[in-house]
Every structure is written in C-alpha cells, then in structure tokens.
Image (cartoon, helix red, strand yellow):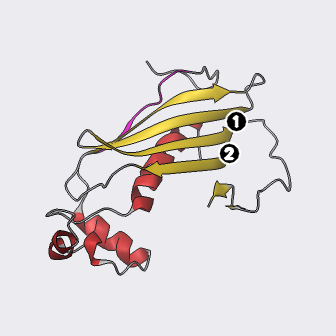
Amino acid sequence: MTHDLSFPVAGEALAPLTVAHIDPATLKLVAALMDDPNPIHFDTAAARAAGLGDRPVAQGPLTFGYLLVMAARAVGGHDGLRQARIRFLGNVFAGDRLECTGVIHEVTPDAQRMTLRCRAEADGRPVADMDATFLLDGADAPSGQASPTSRNGMDL
C-alpha cells in the first residue's frame, strides 16, 4: 500500500521504480561519462574473462542512481536529500530487469525529516540496499553540519 507523503507514516511503501531491461548501450555510455575504462561494463568477452558470466556488468553508481531517483520521487524531489548510504549485494547485468522498492523507515515526530529504506533487485536477486534521509518541505537545513566524510550531503 502506498501513502500520500504529505503525511508520512513509517512502514508505508514507496511507489516502485522498474527498469524493464538494462541496456548494454547505456552501460557503454555510462562507462564513457564516468571515464571508466574497465571493459567488463561493455565487453562480453572481458566480463567472461573476469569470471562474471556472459553479459556486461552495470556500474554500481547506475544502480545507486536508480534507487535515488525512486526515493526522490517519493518525497517530491532531491533537494531535501541529506544522506544516502548504499550497500552493494550483487551485480546487475545487461539485460536484467531492475526493480527498486522502498518503505518509509522513520519519520521524526515533527514530520520534518524522513528516512527511507530501499532495495534494488535484478531479476529477483538482491543487488543493493540503500538508506536515504530527506528533510521534508518546510524543514530548515542545518548549516555547517556536514561531516568530514561528506560532500554535497552524501556519505562518501
């Protein structure tokens, strides 16, 4: 069951984001944009030689990005993002169906801050878990409170 996030409630599901088919051309483009020369992302023979199977491997930041898009849609945009932590659990391959789901994990009593717990699955295999914390509309962003391991509100 999804919920109107103007009144967030812990335990409520977010609207999922589905990528029906991870396109090999997208992986090649992302490799170029990221200046990532690792051929496992665009060359089947390289993926095979690395023991990763017969399909190119998606970049971790691509999966992270899809999870962030789903989370930001749930709260009305990315402006309130204050923290995102991801744990990669497995590989996403070209041709996989990626399903991103999530729930509201915690809401502060004043409904100013919300933490989402999200998961990405590729063809039913868990591939990433993410927790993301957002300030909601009307909440003032604390100034000067970035941790030394943070940049632009995201844990490094």
x and y, in percent, of residue 32 in the image: 37, 78
Q: Secondary structure at mark 1?
A: loop
Query: Taking the image as drawn, is residue 49 in sight?
Result: yes
Looking at the rendered structure, the kind of residue marked 1 is Leu
Residue 18 on the magenta segment? yes
x and y, in percent, of residue 103 in the image: 50, 29
x and y, in percent, of residue 64 in the image: 46, 53
The disc, 2 or 1, on the residue closer to the chain's N-terminal end is 2
Q: Pointers 2 and 1 in contact (CB under 8 A)? A: yes
Q: Looking at the magenta stretch, what is its main secondary structure?
A: loop
In the picture, measured across the screen, residue 141 lies left or right of residue 118, that is: right
Q: Residue at x 29, y 72 (%)?
A: 28
Q: Which residue is mark 1?
A: 136
Q: Residue at x 47, y 25 (%)?
A: 13
Residue 20 on the magenta segment? no
Q: Residue at x 82, y 41 (%)?
A: 140
Marks 2 and 1, how far apart at CA: 6 Å
Q: Residue at x 29, y 54 (%)?
A: 92
Q: Which residue is mark 2?
A: 80
The tally of labels here is: 2
